[in-house]
Image: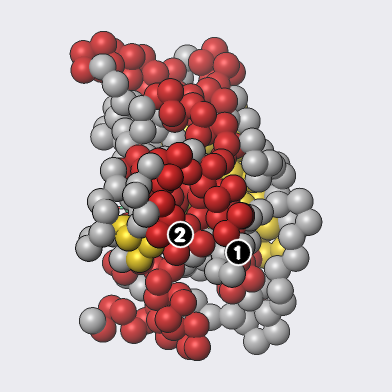
Amino acid sequence: ITQLYGPLNWFGNYYRQIQKNFVDMEKMLDLFKEPVEIQDIPDAKELVIKQGEVVFDRVSFAYDPRRPTLNDVSFRVAPGSTVALVGPSGSGKSTILRLLFRFYDIQQGRILIDGQDIQKVKQKSLRGVIGVVPQDTVLFNDTIRYNIRYGRPGAPDQEVEDASEAAQIHDRIMSFPEGYETKVGERGLRLSGGEKQRVAIARTLLKRPSIILLDEATSALDTRAEAALQEALLSSGRTTLVIAHRLSTIVNADLILVLKDGDIVERGPHIELMREKGVYYDMWMKQLKDERGMGGAWTAMSED
Ligand code: ATP
C-alpha cells in the first residue's frame, strides 16, 4: 500500500481522478513498480500545443545508475506522423513512452514537445495532451458508455458513439440488449481482449489528444479488423508513437526506430531498413521463419 502513496501525492486534489487513470496506465507503464516523485518546477508553464512535434534530444536515462537504460537517444517525430519502436524485449521501448509521459525525469538531454521542455511544463498540461492506449485495458465496473466517455468526461452521447464508430466497436455495442447501458468489467459483461482494446481506442479518440502512445496488442485482433483499426487511429492526423508488434504498422510507419540495449541501432522507413540488411532485416527474416512454423501474430521480436 505504501507504494500507492508516492504517485498519488503528486497530484494532491486530483487524487480520485488520477487514481482511476492509473488503473489504465498501470499495465502498460508498470507505474507502481518504482514510483518516483515528479514535481512541477515552481514557475512551470502550461504546455502549449502547436503542431504536436516530439523531440528526444540526446536523452540518457537509467532506472538504476549502475545500469543505463537509454544511451544518448535522439529522434524527432514530425507533427502528425507515426514512429514505430521495435526491438527485443528490454531494449527500452516502453521506457521511451514512460519518459515522454514524464513518469521519470531523465539524467541527460531534453525531451521537447513543440519546442517546450517537458520538465518545465505543468504535468497536468503535459498529460492532458497525450492519449495512451495500453495493451491491456482495465474496464471499470460500469456501463460501456461510462467506460468510453471516461476519455473526456462530459462529452455528449453523440460524440461517445462517433468515437465508438471510429474504433469499430459501435455495432458490437448495439448488439447487446442494453446497448450503451450494458454493464461491463469484472462484474459485468466480459469483453474480449480485442474488444477491450477497441474501447481503449474509442476512449483515446474521444479525448482528442495531440499525441498518442500506443502499445500495440500482439494478437488481440484479427488481421483484417486490425488493418481497419490502424487506419482509424493512424489517420487521425495525430502524432503517434507506437510500440509495434504488427507487420502492418511497421511497414506503414513514417519512421522506424530499432532499439537494442538502450541504443537506436537503426532508423528509417521500412524499405530503407530492409535494403540495409541489418538488425531490422534479420528481425523480419526471423519473423517470417517463425511464422511459417506457427502462423499468425508477430511475436518473434518481443519474445526475443
Ligand atoms: P518489452 O518489449 O519486454 O516490453 P521494452 O523494450 O519495452 O521491453 P523496457 O520496459 O523499456 O523494455 O525496459 C528497458 C530496461 O529497463 C530493461 O532492462 C528493464 O528490465 C529495465 N526496467 C524497466 N522498468 C524498470 C524499473 N521500473 N526499474 C528498473 N528497471 C527497469
Residue positioned 46% across, 77% down in the render: 17
Provide residue 156's location: percent of width, then percent of height: 61, 62
Provide residue 235's location: percent of width, then percent of height: 64, 36
Question: Relative to residue 214, is residue 28 drawn left or right?
Answer: left
Q: Quadrant of residue 275?
A: top right
Question: Label 2, on which residue?
Answer: 145
Residue positioned 43% across, 28% down in the render: 225
Residue positioned 30% across, 29% down in the render: 299
Quadrant housing the C terminus: top left
Question: Relative to residue 25, is residue 249 drawn left or right?
Answer: right
Question: Label 1, on which residue?
Answer: 155
* Mark 2: secondary structure: helix
The amino acid on which the numbered mark 2 sits, given as a three-letter code, is Arg
Q: Label 1: few (<14), some or many (≥20) within 10 Å?
A: some
* Mark 1: secondary structure: loop
Provide residue 271's location: percent of width, then percent of height: 57, 16
Instruction: Assess whether mark 1 and mark 2 are in contact (beta carbons under 8 angstroms).
Output: no
